[in-house]
């Protein structure tokens, strides 16, 4: 079974040739804290002779110090890698392990069982071909089992093994085993996990893990290892339609332009006609460069470089497909979203979305409901918290080629990236495109913003005043508007009073509502810029990401961020509307500067220190800057 | 249906990772440590960008205590492949006379390797650095991502790693931050040798057994590579037929007795060995969680 047992009498070349034919299986293990996952992996490594003598010596040493088996070898310690884990006796992250038999090499993603680490489970599952779900024979199917199984079904792993562990502790009872299998079957049907193989094992003793157990004469199925050795995995991906994300354009010389990437699904032959998305252009494949030279054909998972017959415009993020079954193209989707960050997902906030090799801006427009993975109940929610799973509508800054995740993981799965921290905050799976994105097309009209602005002899722009309540934003903005108006410029002022009382009167002051508030103001300001106006926006707008979102709605140079900088103490001492006093008394919740944060601009176009400048001086500074930026001529 | 072998899959994954970095990062560099893993990584880079050359330089952090054959091999390899090679030495360390003998193995590694690496990355402003580390080498590596995010100051926080889903790698970073990228994450030592065998990749001759001058210290065979190795009273270098499983600073790298003179012999030896490759590394023995601690401080 193990590599060492390959018969040494066979010539080396023959043995190496056999080794070169081994395939690869990636699988994950999951279960709750004490189901014995680590022990199972330790057992697989040990029995396939993947543990070296010095590692074994270290393990014996560790078992005496940290072990939970009274000094006997604790296989779990082999896998619990980080020092913090060994001290706490828990697994805190996905760990990858490797072992091989004569037939196959295995990559095991060991994912923790604690509730708070759904994130890691989904991560491990996204690259796994198979999943081994452990249950403790004494406990049966528990909440964690259901949670993990739901996630596995959600991510779309098709080969599932239910390993009923610790059979030695229930006297290898068939009745216990059958009951657990029946329970699991009933649950599996509810979540669309149609088929699975159940195996009674003892990871500690090795029963039915690598050797058939004499204690389970009633079980005539394969051992866990022989089952994992014989699973077929490659066929499905190759039978899907051809998809290829262009990853990098290779311009090796004046005569060579190749498109490097990894085949997502299906296969492509030299001479095949291919369609490029989103442009829709058609060409044919002239060369397929593989790692060892030219190929006639490339299939799913191969990293190759393609050359095309025509000189068409191809860039990173484009998707090549077969022309008779090409992907959809949309900028609005209904998706399943798994949230992976401590800061909750707020509808309306802008994120980066990466699908394939394409990254675009994205906004969750609507959180329809969240799924309780323990009960499968749907509940309404305004935000998606860490480890939450929600069904959402999502809108993108531009249309992307896609397939439904159920049809193709590589063209239907995406990640969301926080624009401020750059952290990966969400994993999503496309359910379908929303029809309205196909129905609503921007009217292409001849009278454009340049024409409208030209008529007014001005350059449209947004002057975005941000700062604490009482900083003097509206006062300064009013003075600026008067100066511009006198100079014959067409302006409009959007401020809290005229927007909060009308367009945004349904919004309160929670973080989620503040985000939506600013989104709407940004959109209105954008329309006004389109109409050729110079728009003054005067809002506290405390979050950088929303101000950035507003900035990105218009062309570069059209967004002027004006930071009205006033120390909190000064703003509070002015307190023209008495709001700070009420906030301090607790009568107003979520008041910026008191119990809600203000994130100052990092690089505002204009910064005004109103502890030094009078309102008139500040307005003068703004006008001078506008002249400098070329927004207006001399005023 | 054609099925890729496990080596073909690992090869494709590594190539995909390298192209992703080149497509998304502004200033990538490849850490070239001259060992077998670096040789495989470099070989894969030549394939990934063929017919173009890899669009990044190689960087070697020279502790000044590497085997002489490593340095010769390094220079010959860069020349053979026509690649830019940057060699960085921590000159402050040299000025202070840092060596494994005067400062101990930990401090020597900290100053001449970890600090030197940070110096070099900062000096050239590299935002992504390929390394040849594998997850099977050591327990704390098993949990590291392929794209390992480093905060300003090159710190690694195992609790703040970015999840890696499907083939989607998040390469976005802020000012002063960087990414270490490990294309060989999923390779094992045996995979590396098998691949070297199949692809006939040149490696430093120190991996092959031949009679060499060694002294035995603390149960390890240390090669007398030059006159700087201080001999203890009564210590006489002996000729032993030895080879190395990993290569580092010669006073810190233990040789093993072996008859493996070819790559094929090495693969065969791998199939029957009972000891892991890191048993020859002095620096790993310092403390149980030694590697994790070094990584948090910025070690590769």
Image (cartoon, grey):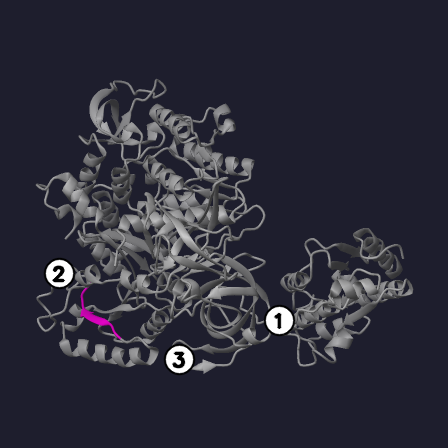
- The answer to whether A447 appears left or right of A395 in the picture is right
Query: Circle 2 — which element?
Result: loop
Question: Based on the displayed image, in which of its 4 quarters is residue B231 positioned?
Answer: top left
Q: Secondary structure at mark 1?
A: helix
- Callout 2: chain: A
Magenta-drawn segment: A195-203
Same subunit, tags 3 and 2: yes
Of B25 and B67, nearer the camera is B25
- The answer to the question of whether label 2 and label 1 lie on touching residues, with beta carbons closer than 8 A, is no
* Horizontal and vertical percent position of residue B82: 43, 30
Q: Kindly identify which residue carries mark 1.
A: A511
- Residue B64: numbered disc: none
- Chain of the residue where label 1 is placed in the rendered structure: A
Q: Residue at x 27, y 69 (%)?
A: A160
Q: Is residue B159 magenta?
A: no
Relative vertical location of residue A40 with respect to residue A578 in this rendering, above or below: above
Parent chain of label 3: A
From where the camera sits, is residue A463 visible? no
Query: Residue drawn 23% across and 62% down?
Result: A232
- Provide the residue designation for mark 2: A211
Residue that badge 3 annotates:
A376
Dot 1 or dot 3: first in sequence order is 3
Q: Of callouts 2 and 1, which one flags the residue occurring earlier in the amino acid sequence?
A: 2
**Quick one: A58 or A484, which is closer to the camera?**
A484
Residue A246 rendering spot, x and y as whole percentages: 46, 54
N-term-proximal mark, 3 vs 2: 2
């Amino acid at each position: 079974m193990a590599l060492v047992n390959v018969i040494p009498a066979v010539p080396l070349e023959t043995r190496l040739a056999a080794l070169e034919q081994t395939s690869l299986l990636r699988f994950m293990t999951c279960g709750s804290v004490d189901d014995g996952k680590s022990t199972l992996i330790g057992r697989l490594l040990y029995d396939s002779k993947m543990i070296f003598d010095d590692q074994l010596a270290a393990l014996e040493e560790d078992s005496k110090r940290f072990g939970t088996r009274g000094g006997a070898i604790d296989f779990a310690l082999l896998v619990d890698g980080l020092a913090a884990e060994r001290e706490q006796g828990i697994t805190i992250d996905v760990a990858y392990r490797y072992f091989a038999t004569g037939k196959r090499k295995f990559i095991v993603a060991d994912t923790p069982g604690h509730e708070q680490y759904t994130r890691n489970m989904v991560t491990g599952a996204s690259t796994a071909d198979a999943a081994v779900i452990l249950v403790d024979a004494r406990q049966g199917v528990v909440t964690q089992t259901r949670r993990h199984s739901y996630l596995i079904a959600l991510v779309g792993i098709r080969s599932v093994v239910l390993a009923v562990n610790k059979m030695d502790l229930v006297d290898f009872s068939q009745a216990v085993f059958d009951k657990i299998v029946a329970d699991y079957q009933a649950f599996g049907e509810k979540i669309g996990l149609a088929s699975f193989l159940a195996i009674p094992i003892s990871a500690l003793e090795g029963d039915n893990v690598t050797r058939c157990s004499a204690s389970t004469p009633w079980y005539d199925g394969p051992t866990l290892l022989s089952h994992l050795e014989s699973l077929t995995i490659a066929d499905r991906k190759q039978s899907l339609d051809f998809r290829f994300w262009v990853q990098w354009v290779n311009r090796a010389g004046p005569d060579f332009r190749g498109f490097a990437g990894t085949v997502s699904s299906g296969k492509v032959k030299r001479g095949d006609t291919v369609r490029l998305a989103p442009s829709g252009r058609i060409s044919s494949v002239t060369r397929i460069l593989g790692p060892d030279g030219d190929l006639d054909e490339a299939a799913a998972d191969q990293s190759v470089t393609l050359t095309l017959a025509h000189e068409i415009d191809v860039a990173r993020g484009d998707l090549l497909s077969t022309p008779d079954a090409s992907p959809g193209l949309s900028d609005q989707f209904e998706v399943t979203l798994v949230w992976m960050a401590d800061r909750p997902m707020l509808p309306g906030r802008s994120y980066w979305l990466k699908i394939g090799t394409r990254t675009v801006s994205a906004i969750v427009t609507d959180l329809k409901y969240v799924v309780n993975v323990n009960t499968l109940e749907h509940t309404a929610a305004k935000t998606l918290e860490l480890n939450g799973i929600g069904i959402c509508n999502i809108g993108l800054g531009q249309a992307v080629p896609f397939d439904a995740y159920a049809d193709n993981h590589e063209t239907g799965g995406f990640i969301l990236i926080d624009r401020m921290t750059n952290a990966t905050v969400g994993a999503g799976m496309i359910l379908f495109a929303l029809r309205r994105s196909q129905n609503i097309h921007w009217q292409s009209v001849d009278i454009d913003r340049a024409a409208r602005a030209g008529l007014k002899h001005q350059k449209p722009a947004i002057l975005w005043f941000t700062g604490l309540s009482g900083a003097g934003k509206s006062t300064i903005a009013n003075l600026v508007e008067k100066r511009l108006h006198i100079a014959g410029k067409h302006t409009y002022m959007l401020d809290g009073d005229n927007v909060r009382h009308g367009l945004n009167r349904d919004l309160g002051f929670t973080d989620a509502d503040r985000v939506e508030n600013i989104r709407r103001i940004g959109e209105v300001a954008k329309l006004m810029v389109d109409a050729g106006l110079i728009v003054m926006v005067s809002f506290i707008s405390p979050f950088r990401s929303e101000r950035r979102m507003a900035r990105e709605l218009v062309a570069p140079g059209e967004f002027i961020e004006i930071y009205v900088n006033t120390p909190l103490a000064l703003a509070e001492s002015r307190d023209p509307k008495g709001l700070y006093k009420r906030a301090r008394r607790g009568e107003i919740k979520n008041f910026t500067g008191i119990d809600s944060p203000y994130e100052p601009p990092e690089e505002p176009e204009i910064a005004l220190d109103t502890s030094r400048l009078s309102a008139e001086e500040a307005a003068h500074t703004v006008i001078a800057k506008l002249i400098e930026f070329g927004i207006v001529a001399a005023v | 249906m054609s099925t890729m072998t496990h080596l073909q899959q690992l090869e494709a994954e590594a190539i995909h990772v390298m192209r992703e970095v080149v497509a998304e990062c502004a200033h990538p560099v490849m850490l070239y440590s001259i060992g077998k893993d670096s040789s495989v990584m470099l070989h894969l880079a030549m394939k990934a960008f063929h017919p173009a050359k890899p669009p990044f330089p190689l960087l070697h952090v020279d502790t000044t205590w590497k085997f002489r054959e490593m340095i010769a091999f390094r220079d010959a390899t860069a020349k053979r492949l026509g690649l830019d090679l940057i060699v960085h030495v921590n000159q402050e360390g040299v000025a202070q006379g840092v060596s494994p003998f005067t400062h101990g193995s930990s401090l020597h590694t900290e100053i001449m390797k970890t600090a030197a690496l940070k110096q070099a990355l900062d000096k050239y402003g590299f935002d992504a650095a390929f390394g040849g580390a594998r997850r099977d080498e050591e327990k704390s590596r098993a949990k590291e991502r392929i794209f390992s995010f480093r905060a300003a100051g090159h710190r690694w926080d195992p609790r703040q790693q970015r999840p890696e889903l499907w083939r989607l790698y998040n390469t976005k970073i802020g000012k002063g931050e960087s990414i270490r990228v490990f294309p060989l994450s999923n390779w094992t030592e045996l995979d590396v040798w098998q691949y070297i065998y199949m692809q006939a990749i040149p490696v430093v001759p120190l991996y092959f057994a031949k009679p060499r001058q060694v002294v035995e210290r603390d149960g390890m065979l240390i090669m007398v590579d030059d006159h700087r190795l201080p001999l203890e009273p009564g210590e006489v270098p002996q000729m032993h037929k030895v080879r190395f499983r990993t290569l580092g600073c010669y006073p810190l790298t233990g040789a093993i007795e072996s008859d493996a003179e070819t790559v094929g012999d090495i693969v065969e030896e791998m199939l029957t060995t009972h000891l892991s490759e890191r048993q020859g590394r002095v620096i790993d023995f310092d403390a149980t969680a030694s590697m994790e601690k070094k990584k948090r401080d910025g070690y590769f």
